[in-house]
Image (cartoon, rainbow, N blue to C red):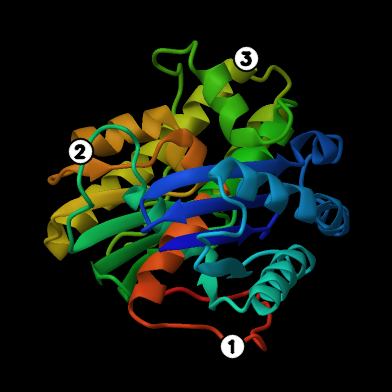
Amino acid sequence: MRVLGIESSCDEFAAAVVERGRRVLSNVVASQIDLHARYGGVVPEVASRAHLRAAIPVVDQALREAGGGWHGIDAVAATYGPGLAGSLLVGLNVAKSLAFGRGLPFLGVNHLEGHIYANWLEDGSGRGDPEQPALCLVVSGGHTDLIHMQDHGRYHRLGRTRDDAAGEAFDKVARLLGLGFPGGPVIERVAAGVAVPDFELPRAWLRGTDDFSFSGLKTAVLHLTRDAAPPPREQIAAAFQTSVVDVLAEKTARAARSAGVRQVLLAGGVASNSALRREITARSPVPVRFPPPRYCTDNAVMIAGCAYFHLARGERSPLSLDVQPNLKFA
């Protein structure tokens, strides 16, 4: 089964073709980073208008790169939430129109579940599928969740952020430090030159829960930047990243021990952070798996891959499916 997937939940319009949920045949992403960088964050109306211009060229390129055009495409899938309403509308309606016009099955995919299924994609290492039950840390610009994945389609959320998501905190701190957008890659790059920060920033442990909080950490950085003689920004970036990684890694390791899982799966844009990967791997009581960086950030490969497992179980979505910007998961 070959699935054409479309992802448009935020500032990137992407299309991809994936075979049997694992083999990537094409992967095309139209990024808007340069478009939004001047604003220090994503402007929803600007993003949705850019999606309208990118949609058909991106889909056409994905079909060409996969080979055979529409021949061999068995289904169409798209993200329907969570995300920015206008951005979601473009991708979802393009996907539904293509499915209807071609007489193909259609499936709407939860964006967060798609991130998890990036771990099923072939990466050239020869590894088999992830082992279940698994603990999934979904950590991105809008979400920081710990999910107990018992089996395909069976999830239970153990913890979530109570305020800022980790990726959101990276973006806001990068803005405070004048480092630009997006914040995650630039903070990691600036912090790489500091072996051990000269000072520590606070950690919100929220004892007795698997929840997260990064708002207080962000406020601590704000106060530092307003000092008469603030520390060098590479020191602040390193101390900030160390605090975020410490909390994410420790709480994930504790939850893995408590839940008795067989593997830990990282997912989402922040999962591409090398310090986070190292710390979770070092602390986890079970093997840790994460996708290649190109599949951690938003892409359509993960949407097509996730859709395969639903379609294989006979699941379909009606063409009346609407976007759900605040769609919940687990």
Q: Count neighbours of disc 1 (C-alpha within 10 A) and say few if under 14, some if 14 to 19, many if 20 or more.
A: few
Query: Residue flagged by tag 2: what amino acid is it?
Result: Arg
Q: Residue at x 72, y 40 (%)?
A: 31
Q: Quadrant of residue 284?
A: top left
Element marked by disc 1 = loop
The mark lying in front, picked from 2 and 1, is 1
Element marked by disc 3 = loop
Q: Which residue is mark 1?
A: 318
Position of 110 relative to 213 (above/below): below
The mark lying in front, picked from 1 and 3, is 1
- For the residues labelled 2 and 1, the Cα–Cα distance comes to 44 Å
Q: If you read the primary sequence from the N terminus, does the residue marked by circle 2 or circle 1 appear first?
A: 2
Residue 247 appearing in the image: yes
Q: Which residue is mark 2?
A: 283
Query: Residue flagged by tag 3: what amino acid is it?
Result: Pro
Q: Residue at x 68, y 82 (%)?
A: 322
- For the residues labelled 1 and 3, the Cα–Cα distance comes to 54 Å
Quarter of the N terminus within the rendering: bottom left
Q: Which residue is mark 3?
A: 232
Q: If you read the primary sequence from the N terminus, does the residue marked by circle 3 or circle 2 appear first?
A: 3
Give percent across and percent down for residue 210: 32, 62
- Is residue 207 left or right of 52 when viewed as pictured? left
- Is residue 310 left or right of 126 when viewed as pictured? right
Give percent across and percent down for residue 176: 72, 33
The mark lying in front, picked from 3 and 2, is 2
